[in-house]
Image (spheres, helix red, strand yellow):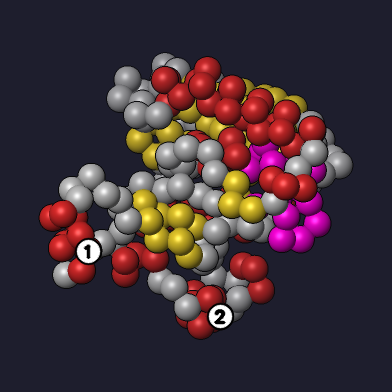
Amino acid sequence: MAVEGIKMVAPKIKFRLCSMPMAPGPGDAGFADDFAYLKRFGIDSPLYEDFTDIYCSMNYTPFLTYFRSLEREMNCLRKPKETLLENGWGVPRTGKLVGLQLAAAFFAGMEHPYIASGMNVADGAQIAEARRAMQFVAETEGEWENAAWRREKSPYKILSGPENRFWRMERLAADGTLFVLALNCSADERIEVSIAPSGADTQRLELPPYSYRLLKFARK
């Protein structure tokens, strides 16, 4: 009721929910299940849909849990997302990791860039990689921003490198074009992978450490 009253006075106002990210998945991040995760952090994001305009998840992990939570929020939440990244709570991130996480956040529904803390300890490499990620988005988002988020992802095969450091996210355009954001989350190993969507040619690529690449697949 309070939210409705405020919006009557200021119709353009938007309410952001700043919270921990959604649980990355059962057994992940050291939690046996979603209940254990919620017991630790105390916020179940979908319960706030009625009055939240934008979700601001404080997704501060440097590991694959970052991408798993991003993906789960896209699958479960109906409102826009504005993922909060960090660079200063713990050891400052490398520039490549900052850029990698920022690019993934954009592809997974981010409204605009947002680093919640730590820019005061950012170095030139971090600023350069953040800028590169935003330039990547500026050059490509016209193609994929209105494409539908895909829950079911295409098969892939790791040809070399650590399988537990590869991640991908997908969007499908109305004309059948499939966009795949492929990510190497390893700090020091290259990954070679082939991705084989149904009804499209297989593509093979090599990803340097902490790198990302957008692939386009045309339906046959």
Residue 3, numbered label: 1
Amino acid, disc 1: Val
Q: Give the residue pinned by disc 2.
A: 40
Disc 2 secondary structure class: helix
The part of the image, by quadrant, that contains residue 157 is: top right
Residue 94: x %, y % from top left: 79, 43
Magenta residues span 86-101
Up/down of 50 relative to 98, above or below = below
Q: Quadrant of the N terminus?
A: bottom left
**Is 219 in front, or is 145?**
145
Alpha carbon separation for disc pair 2 and 1:
27 Å
Disc 1 secondary structure class: helix
Q: Residues within 10 Å of mark 2 (few under 14, many from 20)?
A: few
Up/down of 148 relative to 55, above or below = above
Question: Pointers 2 and 1 in contact (CB under 8 A)?
Answer: no
Amino acid, disc 2: Arg
**Is 141 in front, or is 11?**
11
Q: Residues within 10 Å of mark 1 (few under 14, many from 20)?
A: few
Q: Quadrant of the C terminus?
A: top left
Q: Earlier in the sequence, mark 2 or mark 1?
A: 1
